[in-house]
Image (cartoon, rainbow, N blue to C red):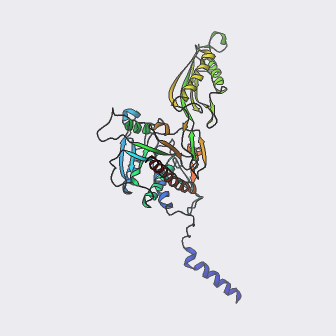
Amino acid sequence: MKRISQLLLLCSALCSPAAYATPTPHTDEPSYRQDLLDLHKSLVDIPSLSGAEEDAALFLQKYLGEQNYAVELQPIPAGLHGGSNARYNVLAWPTAKKPSTANFKLLITSHIDVVPPYIPYKVSPSGPITSDTLISGRGSVDAKASAAAQLIALSSLVSSESISPEDIMLLFVVGEETSGIGMKEFSRRSHSTSFFRSDEKQYRFHSAIFGEPTENKLACGHKGITSGIIHSKGKAGHSGYPQLGKSANEVLVRSLHSILNTDLGSSERYGNTTVNIGVLEGGVAANVIPKSASAKLAIRVASGSQKEGHKDVIAKVEKILKETDGDALSSEWFGGYGPVKCECEVEGFETMVASYGTDVPNLEGEHKSYLYGPGTILVAHGDDEGLKVKDLEGAVEGYKKLILHVLGEQEEEEQGDL
């Protein structure tokens, strides 16, 4: 009889409707989780390699319009990016109608382009979403995670009437991963009068929050960068008689060895200037003395000013080339900038310094810059790009806190000026 009673109790428990009910959400699950995950997935699902961002821009135009935002697409002229694909920056305001002013307290911005190759969206492990669920795919970190978290954070603050919508402008740009063409073009139109149409405005901002993967830490800045090509000239000949020729490869290698072993500049905040030899080319066969060779370099600049720091590094490299073999070696450089300082003294945030480049130096103007976002750059361009749900949700809370801090700080400054 006792055995029968136990079986009946077990059956009652298993057959109860509650046994098959959806698990109760975790108490720490934010109310916006589903909206955040849906938006993030929609963005990652859209292939938007640099140069082919049109679909992502059109999606944001539609999404923001449905959220009752005023939206404008800013076309990037084909002559500037050298391609035939339509490319648009997305400008938006959390108001039903585009504001008449061109001056805003805060710009919130990130980029919608990603590096190749396209990697599909994936959730693991399968099953119910928890804070430890891993979301992966190209752009899941860099930087569609930032864009999604920024939008959810802003919508939350606006709906709770914690901020004034008229203080904010949104900007999602193309081409950050390559030339920075999107932000440069937006900045050019906002600071030049020579190319303006009558409907374009010269936007001004007191502060700007840039979305990039910083592990939900506030970046105090990032290294600068310059890139270039070193060319080496030699004299072709038979490899059995090296004294009759001149190896362009040998001269190049000697110069690169010196560059790698020379202090090109350092600072307490940004560390050492580092050199990456990305591409090496030279020679035609193993038994032929190479006549020409070249090396493509990317140098992360850790010292000097934002405006001049890269020039100091270039000068040091060119001195090395001259001392190694001034007749055989030459170089060409493609601009750059020195270390970029960002605001990071905000209570409640851990801080870090980044070694990668961003659009921060591409936005001209006298504004304060903040750099913040979910995920780590260490996986951003890899096959394993991804982040956990709790990192994405943590960024929403971080952006909310940062937006409130920036606007509150400005209000204090304005009151102090009265």
The image position of residue 280, as x and y in percent, is 59, 27
Q: Quadrant of the N terminus?
A: bottom right
Q: Image quadrant of residue 194?
A: top left
Say if residue 358 shows up in the picture.
Answer: yes
The image position of residue 382, as x and y in percent, is 57, 43
Residue at the extreme front of the image, as rendered: 418
Q: Image quadrant of residue 275?
A: top right
Residue at the extreme bottom of the image, as rendered: 1
Residue at the extreme top of the image, as rendered: 244
The image position of residue 229, as x and y in percent, is 54, 25
Image: 236 above or below 269: above
> Which residue corresponds to the image point at 36% horizontal and 36% vertical from the top-left?
77
Q: Nearer the viewer, residue 225 or 353?
A: 353
Image: 366 above or below 250: below
The image position of residue 399, as x and y in percent, is 51, 52
Image: 346 above or below 305: below
Q: Would residue 187 be found to the left or right of residue 394 on screen? A: left
Say if residue 177 shows up in the picture.
Answer: no
Q: Would residue 161 be found to the left or right of residue 286 on screen? A: left
> Which residue corresponds to the image point at 49% horizontal and 57% vertical from the top-left?
36
